[in-house]
Amino acid sequence: QKEVEQDPGPLSVPEGAIVSLNCTYSNSAFQYFMWYRQYSRKGPELLMYTYSSGNKEDGRFTAQVDKSSKYISLFIRDSQPSDSATYLCAMSAPGGKLIFGQGTTLQVKP
Amino acid sequence: SQTIHQWPATLVQPVGSPLSLECTVEGTSNPNLYWYRQAAGRGLQLLFYSVGIGQISSEVPQNLSASRPQDRQFILSSKKLLLSDSGFYLCAWSVVRADTEAFFGQGTRLTVV
């Protein structure tokens, strides 16, 4: 079993839709949770990070963590074509080692 | 501010040839350093990470090795490339704590022919 599971998609939505991206994990030692966005042929860039259960909002993006269920989500409101990218969840184990999900490819159609 | 440099951006190498990819970080000291590989349509696979000079941990047995000759320099190497070594290689750094995010370079796309 992989430590982090993420549906690779692809996920295609119309412009303006609410997007929900999810990851599950098995290692209860993970303490820090991140979402990265990666455009084609580029390095990932950090979108959001959180270290506790609950919600964290930043503009159109909301990160949600449920440690009891070992489940994290990223919601994108009012999605735009410029949001089309691959979204990777990542989790930090003790010692600072990051483990990534497979990434979900998102396409927002005008 | 901190920056990370990774080069080259693109590389085409024949099977059996050596490899050396370099990554340097500026604006911080004693960072954690990472090498990841991303196959087409796949997630990031952690190859090596380092918490200090000369301290390298390998995550996956493979044809590659890593070295950290200086605090902010991380090198990925191979003596003889295989076709299966093709992929997108990413260097990253983070502050030395368990609860912090990592920052990535722009990656090297390696094609072994």
Image: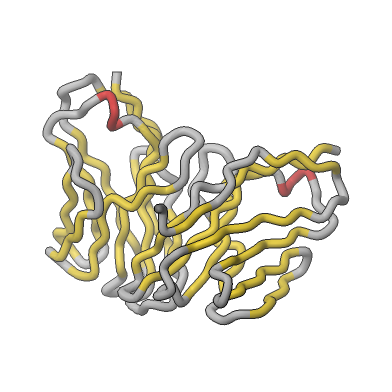
Depth check: B56 or B53 in front?
B56
Give the quadrant of the C terminus of chain B.
top left
Depth check: A58 or B10 in front?
A58
Label total for image? 0
Where is residue A24? Give x, y as percent.
54, 60
Residue located at (58% from left, 66% from top): A71
Where is residue B38? Give x, y as percent.
41, 41
Q: Is residue A53 above or below residue A89?
A: below
Q: Which quadrant of the structure image shows residue B93?
A: bottom left
**Does residue A71 appear to the left or right of B37 in the view shown?**
right
Depth check: B8 or A6 in front?
A6
**Does residue A35 appear to the left or right of B81 in the view shown?**
right
**Does residue A103 appear to the left or right of B29 in the view shown?**
right
Where is residue A86? Give x, y as percent.
60, 45
Residue located at (65% from left, 38% from top): A10
Residue located at (31% from left, 58% from top): B34
Q: Is residue A13 above or below residue B113?
A: below
The color scheme shown is secondary structure
Where is residue A47? Give x, y as percent.
61, 62
Residue located at (41% from left, 36% from top): B39
Q: Is residue A39 above or below residue B104?
A: above
